[in-house]
Amino acid sequence: DDAPGHQQVERFPVPDHPIINWLGESLTVKYFPQAIPHVFRHFAKPLAAVRARYGLEPVSSLLEMLTHGDYTLYPDDPWLTPVDGAPSGHLFLGPVSWQPEGLADSDPWQGLDPERPRLYVTLGSSGALRLLPLVVEALAGLPVVAVIATAGRAELGSLPPNLAARPFVRGAELARDAALVIFNGGSTTGYQALSQGTKVFGLPSNFDQYLAMEAIERAGAGLSVKARQATAVLIRAGVERALSDATLDAGARTVAEHFAQHDAAETFRRFVARASERDASERRASEPSASFRQKRCP
């Protein structure tokens, strides 16, 4: 199987956590695998407590909690992030992409040099906001233009002439026009960019962002720098490397081809219809027959 995710990952990435400031990078990475079971049990405790209150068996970990329903739906692609041996109640919807309406009247690239490569930058609602000034510094001296979507989280003030800031944009459209998307490493913007065949450069800080970025890098569609290690110099070097690496363009196009095979909305509609019919059938099967009811209730 040529799926990049089949290169089995036996470890979890270390997210940006205050403990790194106490122990240092190497010690944290060394002992993080031993801490993971305790961390996962901690996150499952609230649900376990509710289940215990109603006499239900507890869930033991975060991973069990996330997949404990009758159905588990993945807004993902099985080629990029395969789940080997998944139960029949697990279903891949494909990437779910969304962008806001009502922003199409203005050109987000207006005022920027049309002859330079375009970059789309966003750290979304959960990226490390302190990185934005570093990104600005990194891109200021490069022969590119960039639109930075702040999601209304920051005021960047006066910017170099090759950069422009917008509070909100239509991300898929900017990604389609861009040579590279710089983002927080998470699947939302990452998949939006890759669905357009555009390579990415990630600055992950949260656990899910590291996981998504690992899958994207295994697919050869992007590069990353850990947010906790990012400097303007490292970001600039990473962007230059990503822009010049044609293999990343090929990797992004390959991911886009796999993504194009999905219609998440239609798959979800079919799932709801099937699940509703199945549940209705099970309820009918569990009800007493009409003749039995008549005998019991003359």
Image (cartoon, rainbow, N blue to C red):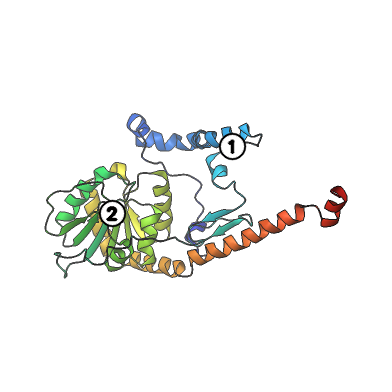
Secondary structure of residue under mark 2:
strand
Q: In the image, residue 190 lies at what x, y percent?
A: 37, 57
Image quarter of the N terminus? bottom right
Q: Is residue 243 above or below residue 70?
A: below
Q: In the image, residue 74 lies at what x, y percent?
A: 51, 56
Three-letter code for the amino acid on which mark 2 is drawn? Thr
Three-letter code for the amino acid on which mark 1 is drawn? Ser
Q: Residue furthest right?
A: 295
Q: How many marks?
A: 2
Q: Is residue 182 visible?
A: yes
Q: Which residue is mark 2?
A: 122
Q: Is residue 221 visible?
A: no
What residue sits 17% from the left and 65% below the top?
A: 110
What residue sits 64% from the left and 57% below the top?
A: 88
Q: Is residue 120 above or below residue 227?
A: below
Q: Which residue is mark 1?
A: 60
Classify 10 Å Cα crowding around label 1: few (below 14), some (14-19), many (20 and above).
some
Q: In the image, residue 224 lies at what x, y percent?
A: 33, 52
Q: Residue furthest front?
A: 298
Q: In which quadrant of the rendered view does residue 95 lie?
A: bottom left
Q: In the image, residue 91 lies at what x, y percent?
A: 57, 59
Instruction: Using residue 275 as the reference point, say whether residue 42 is left or right of it.
Output: left
Instruction: Using residue 284 as the reference point, say whether residue 179 is left or right of it.
Output: left
Q: Nearer the viewer, residue 255 or 281?
A: 281
What residue sits 36% from the left and 52% below the top?
A: 185
